[in-house]
Amino acid sequence: VTVRETSPGGTELQPLIAFPTSQLLWVRLAALVFTCVAFSVAAHGAELSHRGMADWCIFCWAFSFACTLLVLLVEQFGLQTRAPVSWSNFPITVACYAALLCLSASIIFPLFFLKDQYLRNEVRDHRIASTVFSCLAAVAYMGEVSLSKARPGEVASYMATAPGLLKVFQTFVACVIFILISDPVAYDHHAALKWCMAVYCICFILSMGVVVLCVGELTGCLPIPFSKFLSAYGLLAVVMYLTATVIWPVFQFDKSYGSRGRNSPRVIAAAVLTAFNFLLYLADLAYTAKLVFVTV
């Protein structure tokens, strides 16, 4: 919809404000409203305890809301070319991270704040509302990613391709692993477990570095072609995560290695997520090899 002014003589003037009506716009507006309602209701009447988890959930919603609002304003006022980032990479990267953040909040929030049987009805209603709108926001962001990702045979920016989206998943899963094994520290009783921690850190830094390079349009600063860097890094990450996938459960659960029976839910979850991230890196390597060696 375009709003236009007409002079007294009937001369049509330039458009004042343009309102695009694409599916992507409506999905972003929906995500904006859902995240706003989620953190507003939680902050207003949910009476949250467990401040660490409460702060995390509110951060997820507020961060997603702020980034979506930024994307909408930049695109509405046509400032994409003035943005200091690659606008073909930035919105879908933000949407993918927001989807994962809202999904994590949708799982964490009810687990910590809806299991109490002695809540007042009003407080419980506020918490249920926050959970529902968090789930809706996660679905909206998933829809945005689905609408923005590259289609087969389409020329698109790196972050819109499967390897680019996998980088986002890899960094997010690594962050969850860091949280699980750091409080309490679960990797300090054997050198092999410290190697696993090194694997998580190195691969996280490299994956996040790829995301930053793409969003910041800095891939040309590398001393080698970006495609070769991706291939070499992908192979290295697969080998490193393979070792961590084997070593972590062996040295955590086998008492002959001094595990002291540390089979807590956090350690088990870290083992599962390590295997899951290994599969993500393996898929990333396969997609990267296809992009580099088949399409070139």
Image (tube, helix red, strand yellow):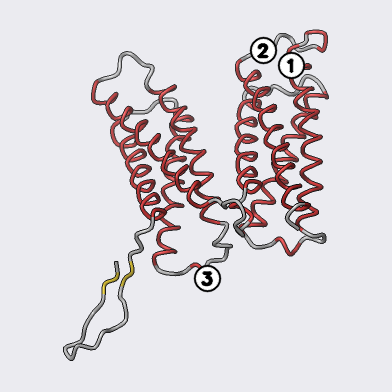
x 80%, y 30%: residue:
195
Could you tell me which secondary element the residue under label 3 belongs to? helix
Task: Please name the residue shown 40% across and 24% down the image.
Answer: 110
Q: Please tell me in which quadrant of the rendered image residue 116 appears.
A: top left
Amino acid identity at mark 1: Gln
Disc 1 + disc 3, Cβ < 8 Å: no
Name the residue rendered at 53%, 45% in the picture.
96
Q: Earlier in the sequence, mark 2 or mark 1?
A: 1
- Residue type of the residue flagged with mark 2: Asn
Task: Look at mark 3 in the image and give the residue it sits on.
Answer: 81
Residue nearer the viewer, 68 or 26? 26
140 vs 173: above or below: below
Q: Where the C terminus falls, by quadrant?
A: bottom right
Front residue (pair 49, 218): 218
Q: Secondary structure at mark 2?
A: loop
Residue 204 percent location from the top left of the image: 69, 41
Residue at screen point 36% across, 52% down? 26
Closer mark to the observer between disc 1 and disc 3: 3
Estimate the x, y position of residue 59 in percent, counting from the top left: 46, 40
**Mark-to-mark CA distance, 2 and 1:** 7 Å
Residue 200: x percent and y percent? 72, 35
Q: Are marks 2 and 1 in contact (CB under 8 Å)?
A: yes
What is the CA distance from the residue labelled 2 to the residue labelled 3?
A: 52 Å
Residue type, label 3: Thr
Res. 263 mark:
2
Q: Which residue is mark 1?
A: 252
- Pick whichever of labels 1 and 3 is earlier in the sequence: 3
